Every structure is written in C-alpha cells, then in structure tokens.
Image (cartoon, rainbow, N blue to C red):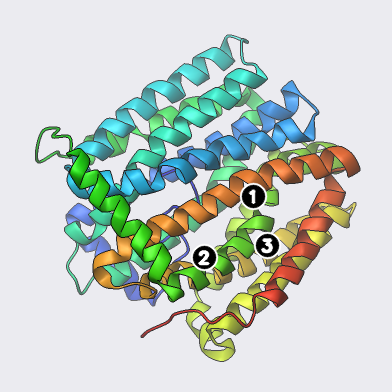
Amino acid sequence: MATPEGKVGASAPAVSGSAWAVLRERPFRALWLADFINNLGFFAQAVGAGWLMTSLTSDAHVIALVQTATSLPLFVLAIPAGILADLVDRRRLIRDANILLTLVAAALAALTFAGHASVFALLAFTFVLGAIDALQEPAWGALIPEVVSARALPSAIALNGIGFNLTRVLGPPIAGFLVAVTGPAAAFAINAASFVPTIAVMRPRAGWRWPTRTAFADGFAKTWSVARTSVGVRRVLARNAAFSTCSSVLFALMPLLVREHFHGSAVQLGVLLGALGAGSVTIAQFFGEVRTRLGIEGAVFIGTVTLGACVIVAGCTPWFPLAVVALFVAGFGWLTVLSTLNTSIQFAVDPQHRAAGFALYLVTSQGINAVGAALWGIVASAGGVGTAFVAAGALFIILGAATRRIPLPWSQ
C-alpha cells in the first residue's frame, strides 16, 4: 500500500496496549507483518526517488512532480478500484498486483544501477508503481474485516496505524543512510523485495472473473449518490481538502529543502521524515485524551495550526536540529488531523455505502496532493523552497481557521 492517506488505519487512533493482542490471530499477524515490510519498502522508494530526482535536476517544479506522480494514480483509480475490489477475489487482486509491483520496482532498480535513470523514466516508473498500487488499495481495506473477529476489528485497525507510523520512523533514516552509501538503486531494490511477503501470504480463493459493465455502472451510481446527497461526506471532504492543499508540500519538496536549504544528504532527508513519523507515533498513544479534551473540531483545528506553524519553522530556520524538532512536533498535528478525518468519514455515510464514501475521501486527498505538489513546486521555483514552506504553513493556518466551524460527523 503506497500512500499515507490511503493506508487503512494509517492514521487511526491507537488504543490501549491490548491492541497488540490481535496479533495472536494468525491470519491477521501474517497480513500485518507483510504490510509492515511493504511499508518499509514504500519509504525506501520515497527517499530514493526524491533524492535521485534532486540529482537529476535542480528544477523545484520537476522535483515536486515525483509526489504528483505518486498521488495522481490513486486520484484517478480509487473509485474504479473500490468497485473492482467488491466484485472480484480480493486476495487474488492483491497478490497479482504485488507481483506486478515487484517486477516494475526491480526494473527501476536495474535501470538506475546501470546509470540510465532520467527525469522522464523516474516519473514514469513512479506513476506506474502508483497506478498498480492504487488498484489494490481498496482491496486491502476490505480484507481486514475478513481475517479478524468483529470484536478485534478496532484493535486491528489501530495496530495497522501503529505499524505504519513505526515504519515511518524506521524506514526513512535507514533508506537515507542506504542511499547515501550505495545510491538510490539499492532503495528501489529493497522496495521490490518488500512485495514478496505479501505475495507469499495471499491465498486466492477463486480465479479471475471480470465484473460486468452493469456491475461497474451500479457502483459508480452509488458513489455519485453518496457524494451528491450526503452532507456529512461533503463536510469531511471540505476539511480534508483544506488539509491536503498544504500537506502536499512536505513530501513534494522535503528532498529539495534538505539539499538546497540545509545543504544536507539523503541521511538528513531520512532523519526529517523519520522525525515526522516519530511525532505521529508519540501522539497516537494519547490521541483519545486529546480528542476528549479538545473535541472533534477543536482537535482538527489545533492539529492544523500546529502543523502549519511547524512547516513555517522548517522553512525558515537555518539550523537543521531545529527543523528536526519542528517536524517531530508536526507529527502531532499530522496524526491528530488525519486520524480524526479518517474516522469521521466512516460515520458520514451508512454502513452499506462506506466503501463509496472512503473512495471519495481518497480521491479528494490524492487529487489535491497531486495538484498541490505541482503548485508548491512552481512557488519554490519562483521564490525558493523556504518560501514555499512558509507559504504552505501560513495557508495551513488560514484554511484551518476558515473551516473550523464546519462540523464533522462523529459517533461513539
């Protein structure tokens, strides 16, 4: 699974230590471990691609397109992939997608190792990897309830979130060191290998049976109906759009910030991304208390303002250690906002339409991430990467205040 926003439970609030007890259920444990390894590969790919692009060009707009190429496929394919996941054997869909991902990632590693990587090739491979991953993303979300008991489902979702943020802490620094020592080709090779455990644990139950046009048409009609008639969905999407507009600057321009602003290496890039993940893991342990004290809308507002302020600090400060601290604190805001929005979308629609609602949520996140990354790249080209970070942080705060009074659906 390739994108933070798309991760099932990637931003889910952690529960008590008993969440780990769900690992006693063998089917879920196998999936969780496979996904954990795959997430490590995702961050290795992200660090390698971002750093390689800064080696191929100094054009901030082009560098930011790496994030666009990552996010755009899920924007385009989220709804069709969600419909497909409801109509075919999900295990076979996931397994076959991971076989393709292994081949494509290995090809990128070989191309880079041979010294033939180019701007176009890197963007093309990134887009193809994102497209294949987008096809399996909704299937992963629907698979978890099939492998754990209903009682264990909340713990399973929370544990997925903990696992994703642990890999966000571990993956970028390891990948950064690897890229600095051996080059980005090694990071791409690790990404290719990370899909193998998923291929091994997926046991298809049926052969391919493509759905009819009528089934697809019915799925699109249901999704459009949810978007048109659900006030709750529109409210969540509005808050999510405000958040995604600014958050795209982090993954789009972080490599350029490290190289040009701090004159650092891939190791420093990994440290900054790891700091963001460490902050997310830390606040996850206290998210329930934060939500209780601040309320739903208050938690999103404070999280947004915190994130905006930290992005401004990261873009202004000449001291790398202060940027690390700022990104660590930014992790608090990142998880607080995303965990609330990801949970709220589940309450925005009736249970039978939740897949459609979540598909719309993914479309909003990834579409705005793709466009936002390109726009922040233009800003950085015109005024410098620090200016882009400061502008994004200020807009974070402005949009957070502007959308503060939009109520979010919530139910206990």
x, y percentage for residue 109? 51, 20
Q: Marks 3 and 1: in contact by CB < 8 Å? A: no
Residue 273: which disc? 1
> Which residue: 46% across, 28% down?
128
Classify residue 103 by image quadrant: top left
Looking at the image, residue 139 sits to the left or right of residue 166; the answer is: left
Kind of residue indicated by mark 1 = Leu
Label 1: how many Cα within 10 Å (few below 14, some 14–19, many 20+)? many
The answer to whether one can see residue 112 in this image is: yes
Image: 314 above or below 197: below
Residue carrying label 3? 328
Residue 164: which disc? none
Looking at the image, residue 154 sits to the left or right of residue 212; the answer is: right
Image: 409 above or below 315: below
SS for tag 2? helix
Q: Nearer the viewer, mark 2 or mark 3?
A: 2
Looking at the image, residue 103 sits to the left or right of residue 170; the answer is: left
Question: How much space separates mark 1 and mark 2, taking CA atoms?
Answer: 26 Å
Kind of residue indicated by mark 3 = Phe
Label 2: how many Cα within 10 Å (few below 14, some 14–19, many 20+)? many
Residue carrying label 2? 237
Q: Marks 2 and 1: in contact by CB < 8 Å? A: no
Q: Sequence order check: which comes first, mark 2 or mark 3?
A: 2
Kind of residue indicated by mark 2 = Leu
How many marks the image carries: the answer is: 3
> Which residue: 58% across, 69% down?
239
